[in-house]
Image (cartoon, rainbow, N blue to C red):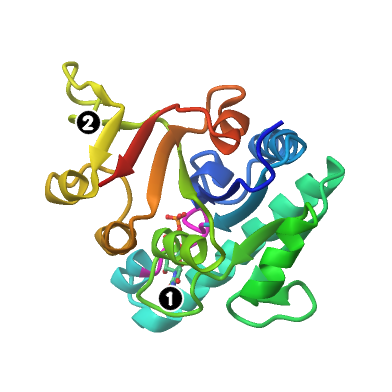
């Protein structure tokens, strides 16, 4: 049993939900839900920020001709669909959940209320945060750091597709690339090591929020990361 105090923020990108294409891959979401539930059963409090890149990315839509802010709002709405899918599979596992969104939509989710989110987690509910920050020009990576700070998580767990941590170079292009067990915020920023976007990383650095980057694909990895096993790469000072 993990100490009752452990509270983490899991960031799941939209790419993970879509299995690489538009829409949702239910098999992937089911497996991730089972693993999250197993970790909560071991006593960890879990908040989740969900991305939306499997539906829309504002920057891409604006390149295709949409006004940027509206495109970003479409991106944020996409994250909510992922939240509802994740909620559904978690509830099917018997895991109580709440979705809280940064854009109010009372029929499908609670509004984002940090103290209420903490209360839910203390009661063993998984809280899924949707609609990013509710503001254009932000990313769900930045929101994951912000939510973790505000609701008192000890680390942010960045689940990645196709890679199991941070490497010295892109392992798909460079066969000499090696996995780093630890990397500093500064190096991740300066060397532009694909961890998360720069604004998210600098917010983590400024507030010393630890980030563990790990691969979502290996069976059991999500549970292991949530209960505190040292897989992948730790980004810290
Ligand atoms: N987005 C936004 N503000 C936020 C979070 C997200 O405008 O606070 C928009 C932005 O257009 C982004 C899209 O929502 O491209 C999907 O989020 P993100 O790209 O972070 O998802 P991920 O890459 O994790 O799938």
How many angstroms separate mark 1 from mark 2 (CA)?
Answer: 30 Å
The quarter of the picture showing ligand 1: bottom left
- Does label 1 point to a residue whose CB lies under 8 Å from ligand 1? yes
- Does label 2 point to a residue whose CB lies under 8 Å from ligand 1? no
Residue drawn 69% across the image and 59% down it? 127
Q: Which mark is residue 136?
A: none
Q: Residues within 10 Å of mark 2 (few under 14, many from 20)?
A: some
> For residue 187: magenta?
no
Quadrant of residue 1 within the rendered picture: top right
Q: On screen, 192 above or below 219?
A: below
Q: Position of residue 210 (x, y in %)?
A: 38, 48
Whichever of labels 1 and 2 marks the residue nearer the N terminus, that label is: 1
Q: Which mark is residue 71?
A: 1
Quadrant of residue 233 within the rendered picture: top left
Q: Which mark is residue 170?
A: 2
Q: Position of residue 64 (x, y in %)?
A: 33, 69
Q: On screen, 178 above or below 126?
A: above
Predominant secondary structure, magenta span: loop
Range of magenta residues: 51-58
In-image side of 172 versus 221 (left or right): left
Residue drawn 67% across the image and 65% down it? 118
**SS category of the residue bearing label 1:** helix
Quadrant of residue 201 within the rendered picture: bottom left
**SS category of the residue bearing label 2:** loop
Q: Position of residue 77 (x, y in %)?
A: 58, 71
């Amino acid at each position: 049993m993990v100490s009752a105090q452990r509270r983490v923020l899991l960031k799941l990108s939209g790419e993970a939900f879509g299995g690489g294409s538009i829409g949702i891959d239910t098999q992937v979401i089911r497996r991730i839900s089972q693993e999250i539930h197993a970790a909560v059963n071991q006593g960890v409090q879990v908040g989740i920020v969900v991305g939306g890149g499997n539906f829309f990315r504002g920057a891409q839509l604006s390149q295709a001709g949409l006004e940027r802010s509206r495109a970003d709002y479409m991106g944020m709405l996409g994250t909510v669909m992922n939240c509802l899918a994740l909620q559904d599979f978690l509830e099917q596992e018997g895991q109580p959940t709440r979705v809280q969104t940064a854009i109010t939509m009372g029929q499908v989710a609670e509004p984002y209320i940090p103290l209420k989110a903490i209360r839910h987690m203390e009661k063993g509910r998984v809280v899924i945060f949707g609609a990013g920050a509710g503001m254009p020009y932000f990313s769900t990576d930045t929101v994951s750091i912000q939510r973790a700070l505000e609701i008192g998580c000890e680390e942010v767990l960045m689940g990645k597709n196709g890679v199991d941590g941070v490497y010295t170079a892109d392992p798909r292009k460079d066969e000499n690339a090696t996995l780093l067990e630890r990397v500093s915020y500064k190096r991740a920023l300066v060397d532009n090591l694909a961890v998360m976007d720069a604004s998210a990383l600098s917010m983590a650095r400024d507030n010393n929020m630890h980030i563990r980057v790990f691969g979502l694909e290996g069976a059991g990895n999500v549970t292991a990361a949530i209960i505190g096993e040292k897989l992948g790469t730790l980004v810290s000072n």
